[in-house]
Image (tube, helix red, strand yellow):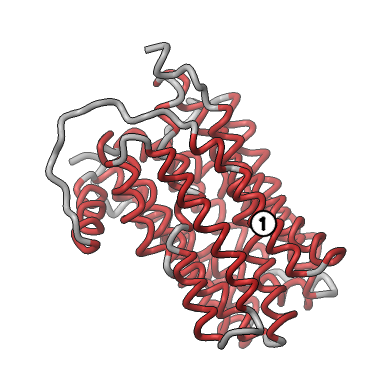
Amino acid sequence: MKKRYSMGPGPLLAGAVAARTGDEMSGPALMLAGFTLAGSSAEASALLAGITVSAVAGGPVLGALLDRHERPGRLLAGALVLYAVGLGVILVALGRLPLAVTVVIAVLTGLMGPALSGGWTAQLPRTVPGDRLPRANALDAMTFSAASLAGPVLAGGVAEVLGAPTAVLVSALLIGSAIPAAWLLPAQPRRPRVARPTSVIGVLAAGIRVIVGRPRLARATVSSVVSCAAQGMVTACVPLLGERVLGGSGRGAVLLSCAAFSALMANAVLVRFPRSLTPDTIIWAGALVQAAAFALAASGRPAVLVVALLIAGIGEGPQLTALFAVRHREAPEQLRGQIFTTGASLKITGFAVGAAVAGPIATWSLPGALAAAACVAVLAALAFFAFPSAA
């Protein structure tokens, strides 16, 4: 038993921080590079949409392969290589190849995106014994908040000093720096072979079947996806909030940093008291906290807006930690990777849908878009109670 956990969570968490920071940096960096090299904000947003939307297909397949592979860390390392190389190819293609070709490259690169989120978290139980998993789980969730805080700041800073293309390269290097940690992850424990689907549709169906078949996992998944849609709606409002409330569209990034900072601090408290509340309670309560914060943000006053985003992070950070805890508790060992990457894919899709819906609403009425986001967050809490607590 000691041999199995000899690695400890340190290398995994270090690799997760590097990969996720690179991921959070790559989106803004690609947007800036697309605008700089292609000269069009529409082309820049098309790149971001391309690299994001394909995660819904890549996640379940990648998760199934991780579950089957004797050394899942080696496969995870390969996915990181492909993602980092893909960013470099996009950069080379910008301004040189037709936009459609560049977007296709972005879509193919985005298939590896869940490796940067759920792919790491699914391996956590192999590095720590069960009694230490709640604390390690909270630390893992903190890496998301830390990455969300550092990534956009790094992208903007590097782009300002060295240019947007260099920011894309730095994000690729950060992702690449996580490869050794992934490569050294422990092997799968030996277990009997079971029949598994081989087609893409079969793999997706298997993951969804497990999520739907376990009510506690289903309600956590649905609530988190709807919460992500609300978060996407608010993110779509950030440039306008910066312009109309803070005096400059670029200042909107400060709001995202506020939410990421408070999420990080809230999870730091959760690390000290990992069993103070049940994960199930935190998921629906976190949605309600975010709903209140988004409604408060509609006031249009600068100080209140900053406080609102700080409150939103207090709901968002622990909610993510709780979601991971539910997945670890409910997912079968042989399908753990698939459950985590499928869940990550669904959340990314929810975020993208929320952002797409909120854009036109915000143009018509910014307070209306924020109020709509608050309503969606309330729906996330209600969705949690739409499922029974046990099968």
- Where residue 282 appears, as percent x and y from the top left, is 47, 41
Residue lying at the far top of the rendered structure: 2
- Where residue 278 appears, as percent x and y from the top left, is 42, 32
Q: Determine which quarter of the picture holds residue 26.
A: bottom right
In-image side of 170 versus 287 (left or right):
right
Does 184 sit above or below residue 129?
A: below
Residue 318 in sight here = yes
- Where residue 311 appears, as percent x and y from the top left, is 65, 51
Disc 1 target residue: 171
- Where residue 221 appears, as percent x and y from the top left, is 36, 51
Which part of the image, by quadrant, shows the N terminus? top left
Residue 311 in sight here = no
- Residue at image point 50% right, 73% down: 105
- Out of 258 and 184, give the one closest to the viewer: 184
- Out of 214 and 12, give the one closest to the viewer: 12
- Residue at image point 58% right, 27% down: 10
Q: Determine which quarter of the picture holds residue 324.
A: top left
Does 260 sit above or below residue 391?
A: below
- Out of 231 and 366, give the one closest to the viewer: 231
- Residue at image point 68% right, 64% down: 168
In-image side of 195 versus 307 (left or right):
left
Which part of the image, by quadrant, shows the C terminus? top left
User: Are there few (<14), some (14-19), or many (20+) residues within 10 Å of tag 1?
Assistant: many
Q: Secondary structure at mark 1?
A: helix
Does 367 sit above or below residue 129?
A: below
Q: Amino acid at mark 1?
A: Ser
